Each structure stands twice: as structure tokens, then as C-alpha cells.
Amino acid sequence: MDTKDILAVIEKFNQTALAEFKYREGSVEFHLKRHADVTYAAPAAHAPHPVAAAVAPAAGAPVPAAVPAPILGETINSPIVGTVYRSPAPDAPPFVEEGKSVKKGDTICIIEAMKVMNEMQAEFDCEIIRVLVDSQHFVEYGTPLFEVRRK
């Protein structure tokens, strides 16, 4: 199993209402577990990937609906599944605050995925209009993190 397959399993897991999933094949082993504050996307009607069938929810399992906040501007979205950290350390100030201008390449948050800390950098000059996630919040791929205005 390569990284692409593992990411596919994670994506399918995030589309289910399962609370936990364990996988073991040969020397590959991983364990996925949801945080209590996670919202779920509706599962796909047909599973295109063979692993997806293994993580599909039981028939009739409730899938809570996410209630998105109205977003009026452009957003910076999570490129990966993981836990967001808005500051470099628990006692440090956040990388960015609402109203702050950031330059392309500035660190705006850290996303921890599979025990790896990934610094997320601004891809363009912008102003942070609204922070959409709290520190230590679990996010899925594509989750809006910041509402921004390009400069």
C-alpha cells in the first residue's frame, strides 16, 4: 500500500460516520479515530475504490449535517486532513489574526497530519478577514480555514 492508497482510505473514512477504523496488511498498519467535534460529509452513493467498501457506514447510520457559516469572500482551504494549530506553541500568539495583512510565503497555521507538522503558508498577499477554525480543531481536506481579501 502506497501513500496514495492511504490518502484514499483517509478520504473515504472522512466521508463516513465511523468513529474509528483500523487497518493492517503485512508491515502496513494504521489507526484512524475521530475527534468529538468532527462533522461529516454525506457518503458517496457508489464506492469507486475497493477500500471504500471497508469504511462505508452501516445502512441507516446517522450522518450529522454540517452547518457552514456564511462565507462572503475568498477562502484559504486546508490542503490535507489533520489538526489545525494557529500558533507555533500553546503559549505563543497566533500566526495571523483577523485584520492582519500577510505576504505570500508567510506561515498562517500548522496542520498536523499523521504526526507530521506541516506549516501552511499564504499562497498570495492578502488580508485575513475572518478566522474560520479554532486551534486544535480537526479539519478535512478542503475545509475553509480563513476568509481573505487578496491584495
Image (cartoon, rainbow, N blue to C red):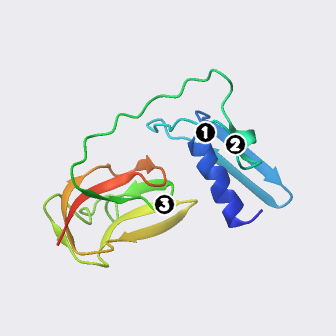
Q: Residue at x 77, y 48 (%)?
A: 50
Number of residue marks: 3
Q: Where the C terminus falls, by quadrant?
A: bottom left
Q: Quadrant of residue 108?
A: bottom left
Q: What residue did someone put label 2 on?
A: 47
How far is disc 1 from disc 3 in space, using C-alphas? 26 Å
How far is disc 3 from disc 2 in space, using C-alphas? 28 Å
Q: Residue at x 45, y 53 (%)?
A: 83
The reply to whether the C-beta atoms of the residues labelled 2 and 1 are less than 8 Å apart is: yes
Residue 1 in the image, given as x and y percentages of width and height:
78, 62
How far is disc 2 from disc 1 in space, using C-alphas? 7 Å
The reply to whether the C-beta atoms of the residues labelled 3 and 2 are less than 8 Å apart is: no
Mark seen at residue 112: 3
Q: Quadrant of residue 107?
A: bottom left
Residue 73 in the image, given as x and y percentages of width and height:
22, 55
Mark seen at residue 44: 1
Name the amino acid type tagged 2: Ala
Name the amino acid type tagged 1: Ala
Classify 10 Å Cα crowding around label 2: few (below 14), some (14-19), many (20 and above).
some
The earlier-in-sequence mark between 1 and 3 is 1
Asked whether, in this view, residue 57 is left or right of residue 144, the answer is right
Q: Secondary structure at mark 2?
A: loop
In the current view of this chain or complex, which residue is farthest to the left?
99
The residue mark sitting in front, 3 or 2, is 2
Q: Secondary structure at mark 1?
A: loop
Classify 10 Å Cα crowding around label 3: few (below 14), some (14-19), many (20 and above).
some
